[in-house]
Structure formats: structure tokens, C-alpha cells
Amino acid sequence: MMMEHSPVDPVGQPEEQAAEAALRPSRLAEFEGQPRVRGQLGLVLDAAKHRGSTPDHVLLAGPPGLGKTTLAMIIAAEMGVPLHITSGPAIQHPGDLAAILSGLVEGEVLFLDEIHRMSRPAEEMLYLAMEDFRVDVIVGKGPGATAIPITIPPFTLVGATTRAGLLPSPLRDRFGFTAQLDFYEVDDLRGIVLRSAAKLDVRIDTESAQIIASRSRGTPRIANRLLRRVRDYAQVNADGQIDADLARAALKLYEVDELGLDRLDRSVLDAICRKFGGGPVGLSTLAISVGEETETVEEVAEPFLVRQGFLMRTPRGRVAMPAGWEHLGLTPPVEAAQRAGSGTDEPDPDLFS
Ligand code: ADP
């Protein structure tokens, strides 16, 4: 069950998705932040244009809301070709993938979101398609089954994943370029808020944009969402103009604290500290105790809590760090402080990959 009222709900409702689409930058030059990725991707695209060929397959990795879908759209727009969108969970049978691939026209871009959630047989078909632009469709069953090779036109696959570490290496190796997206700097997010406000015709000053940016957990999707919620508040409680006091009051109402923790983040942290004595506690137990899905806890709440130094992922489970206890106004037990000092529990290296 999702938390319905969270302003940072990762699963957008249809109207949220429409609002998001309206705010997407359409060219690389408008894509704020991520200078390294922007520079490298720009080069890949320019080189392909120069050669008059299809760009290499691109893998975009990073937590939700950092711009993977946006970049896929930008790649297609920069190359002047249509974009086809699908996702790992939508492709369970190799036949589904064969149908999509054989429908592509030369040079087109196929965006495959959540690529780590594709079924294994479909994944194997994808290897061949990426490398040889061919798929083998199996016709018939048992000993009489035959593989019919189908040639597909050269295309660019843009794969997106929140967990690059979960991709088998044969798949990872077939991407010519991998972009690891990092959380955004506050300055970049402020730029995104100001640009989105202009698009939405919302009056906001720089200080308020800075307040929203600094509570957006390094994530453009959250920055845009908080902006829209603050705008709602301004329309109801003022004349629509957003100033710093109004922004603070609105964010307080939506339960987003000074560091950008929302209700889900705080309930995860609170559960570890109060229900499980600071941990270690297993992910699934933790997820059940906050009424969320494990993926949401793992991919939406945890990366930010780890980044803030509030939580640690250890081989034995999730553990609250002293700073996490203190953020909730609690006194960390002696063991938490010792654990933090001893550094014996290794954080999971796969967390952001
Ligand atoms: P992901 O696919 O990684 O979950 P999206 O591409 O859907 O993320 O981005 C979420 C929202 O954030 C979109 O509305 C998009 O416009 C905005 N966004 C993401 N990255 C940027 C950026 N670098 N500059 C401006 N807006 C961005």
C-alpha cells in the first residue's frame, strides 16, 4: 500500500504524470546539472550525428526522479527520431520483445525502463538484438521447434535502471555508454525550480526557490512536485505569489522537514529507532512495519537516509546511525555511537548501483 498523501509519492498519479511531462526539458542544453553525464552524452550524440550513424546503446542508472526518462526523450529529440517507450515488467515473454523490436524503423530509439525487471528469456533475446540487430523467434515446441532469425534495423536502446548492480554483466557490457546519475546540487535544483515556475506561470522569488530546492532530496522530480504543492498553497492562502514565509509554511503543512525528509523517510527511521531498538532489522520486516513495499523503502527512502548519514545498510540489516536518532530528537544508545565509530559494518556497495 502506498502512502497516499506524500507530496513525494514515487508512483505518480495520471495528473502528476501529465504535470511532470509538461516540465520536462526537451533538449540537452536545457537539462540542468549532471555536467559530466551531459558532456559525455553530448559527445556520443554528436559523434553519431557526425558519422551519420545510430548512437551506441545507452544505459542510464540512478535513483528514481533524476532524469532518466527525460534523457531518453532528449536522446530521441536530439537525433530527430521517434521514441518508443516500454519497460522491463511489460516484457515478460520474448515474443513481446520481438514484436516491439521488429516494429522499429532504422535509427529509432527504444526506451526500456526498469530494464533489470525483464524476464531472463527476454533478456537473452535482447543480447542478440543489441549486438547483431537480429532476434531468433522460436516457432513450435519440443524437438520440432525451430528458430527463425529476423533481422531488425539498427536502433538505439536506452535502458534505465535504479539498480545497475542487478543487471547481469553480459547485458551491461552491451551498452556502449553508461551514465550514472547522481543526486543534484541544491544550486541546480534551484535552477530547475525557477525554470519550472516560469513554465507554470508561478511567481516565486529566488529565496523561496532555494528553500524548495534544499528540501528536495537532490531530486528534480521532488523539486517540481514540491513547487506545485507550494503553488497550490499560495493560490489558496495568498494571491499566488510565493515568498519564503509562505514556502516554509506550505512545506510544514506537507510534512517536509528542513532536510527534505518526508513522512515515509521519517517513518522508516522512526521504525528502526523505536520499534527495533536501532536495528539491525531486515528490509522486509521494516517495509511491513511502515506499511510500504520493500522496493519503495529500498529505492525511495533509503538512498537519501544513507546519504544523510542517518541509516546504514549492513549485512545483518538496516541500522540507525546516531545522526538519525538525533534528527528525530532521540538520544542514540551507546551501541549506535560505538558502531558509528568502529566502522565494522560495511555499507552495502550495491546501494546506488
Ligand atoms: P526518472 O526517469 O529518472 O525517474 P524523470 O526523467 O521522469 O526521472 O524526471 C522526473 C522529473 O524531473 C521530470 O518532470 C523532469 O522534467 C524533471 N527533471 C529531471 N531531470 C531534470 C533536469 N536535469 N533538468 C530539469 N528537469 C529535470
Image (cartoon, grey):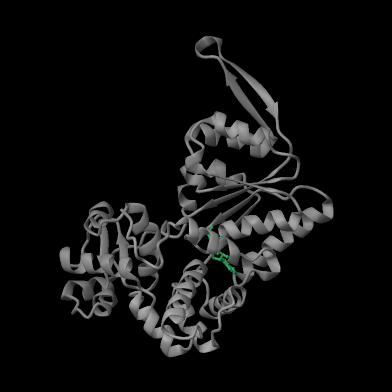
Q: Residue at x 51, y 37 (%)?
A: 91
* 86 to the left or right of 77: left
Q: Is residue 292 in view?
A: yes
Q: Is residue 62 in view?
A: no
Which residue lies most toward the top here? 144
Q: Which residue is at the front of the view, 127 or 348?
A: 127
Q: Position of residue 179 (x, y in %)?
A: 59, 59
Q: Which residue is at the front of the view, 344 or 220?
A: 220
* 134 to the left or right of 284: right
Q: Position of residue 166 (x, y in %)?
A: 45, 48
Q: Is residue 91 above or below residue 294?
A: above
Q: Is residue 239 above or below residue 163?
A: below
Q: Which residue is at the front of the view, 210 or 35?
A: 210
Q: Position of residue 4 (x, y in %)?
A: 34, 60
* 259 to the left or right of 106: left
Q: Residue at x 19, y 78 (%)?
A: 330
Q: How many marks?
A: 0
* 57 to the left or right of 249: right
Q: Is residue 262 above or below residue 138?
A: below
Ligand 1 picture quarter: bottom right
Q: Residue at x 74, y 58 (%)?
A: 78
Q: Position of residue 206 (x, y in %)?
A: 55, 87
Q: Residue at x 26, y 67 (%)?
A: 267
